[in-house]
Amino acid sequence: MIRFDVNGSDHANPPNNERIPTPHIHIYTEEYNNGGIAIPLKDIEDLELTDEIIESLDFFMKYTNIKHDNVIIESRLL
């Protein structure tokens, strides 16, 4: 599971409370402390993951009836 935080305060990553600015993502695997470690968007180099985030956002907007005809999602900014 992936959580995409687009609003809110910075995240304090363990173990030294390094501040990660929003927007960022949380990946729920052991490698990322089951979501406890935030990953800045600028550090995402996995194109498959980037595509998954975009597809999930598109699905969520359709599912919740958010009009997004004029929304432009720039994948290269993720």
Image: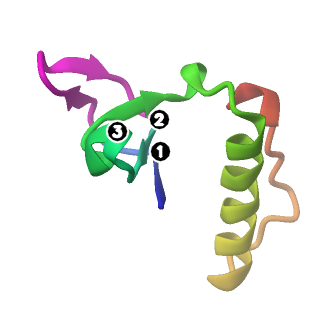
Q: Residues within 10 Å of mark 3 (few under 14, many from 20)?
A: few
- Indicate which label's residue lies in the foreground, 3 or 2: 3
Marks 2/1: CA distance?
Answer: 4 Å
- Indicate which label's residue lies in the foreground, 1 or 3: 3
Circles 2, 1 touching at the beta carbon (< 8 Å)? yes
Residue beneath the point at 67% across and 64% down: 56
Residue 20 at x, y = what percent? 33, 23
Q: Which residue is mark 3?
A: 32
Which image quarter is the C terminus in? top right
Q: Residue 45, located in which quarter of the rendered image?
A: top right
**Residue 15 magenta:** yes
Marks 3/2: CA distance?
Answer: 17 Å
Q: Residues within 10 Å of mark 2 (few under 14, many from 20)?
A: some
In the rendered structure, find residue 52 and report the number of the disc placed on it. Answer: none
Q: Which residue is mark 1?
A: 6
Q: Is residue 58 left or right of residue 35?
A: right
Q: Secondary structure at mark 1?
A: loop
Residue 52 at x, y = what percent? 71, 54
Q: Which residue is mark 2?
A: 23
**Three-letter amino acid code at the position of disc 2:** Pro
**Three-letter amino acid code at the position of disc 1:** Val
Question: Earlier along the polypeptide chain: callout 1 or callout 3?
Answer: 1
Q: Is residue 77 left or right of residue 11?
A: right
**Three-letter amino acid code at the position of disc 3:** Tyr
Question: Earlier along the polypeptide chain: callout 2 or callout 1?
Answer: 1
Q: Secondary structure at mark 2?
A: loop
